[in-house]
Amino acid sequence: MPPTMRVPLLLAFAALAASCGRSPAAKAEEAREKLRSWDATLELLSQERASGAVPERFAEQVRRAAEEERRKAQLQLREAQAP
């Protein structure tokens, strides 16, 4: 395996291993915190973009990343709340 692939693979394994032992309540709280964090990031991005401090291309990249991460957090929250 090339060295450039080892790091992402190790990080994915570590994230999976870390999430296995937590309670559903802890997983739900983590998901809610991720959502709050991304909401705050998007609010700050909007303010900075309006003032001209952030280039539109960068803002669009952050918005796309935020949408993807918010979808993941929403899924995590639904799974943690499922009976």
Image: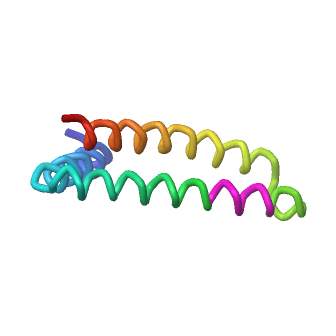
Residue 43 shown in magenta: yes
Q: Position of residue 48 (x, y in %)?
A: 80, 63
The residue at the point 80 percent across, 61 percent down is 47
**Total of numbered circles in the picture?**
0
Q: Residue furthest left?
A: 21
Specify start and end residues of the magenta stretch as a single range: 41-47
Q: Quadrant of the C terminus?
A: top left
Q: Quadrant of residue 22?
A: bottom left
Residue 1 shown in magenta: no
Kindly report the secondary structure that dominates the magenta region of the rendered protein: helix
Where 59 sits versus 36, above or below?
above
Is residue 13 shown left or right of residue 68?
Answer: left
The residue at the point 31 percent across, 51 percent down is 28
Give the colour scheme shown.
rainbow
Q: Quadrant of residue 76?
A: top left
The residue at the point 13 percent across, 51 percent down is 17
Q: Position of residue 36 (x, y in %)?
A: 52, 58
Q: Position of residue 51 (x, y in %)?
A: 89, 63
Where 9 sits versus 23, above or below?
above
Is residue 57 shown left or right of residue 80?
Answer: right
Q: Position of residue 69 (x, y in %)?
A: 48, 44
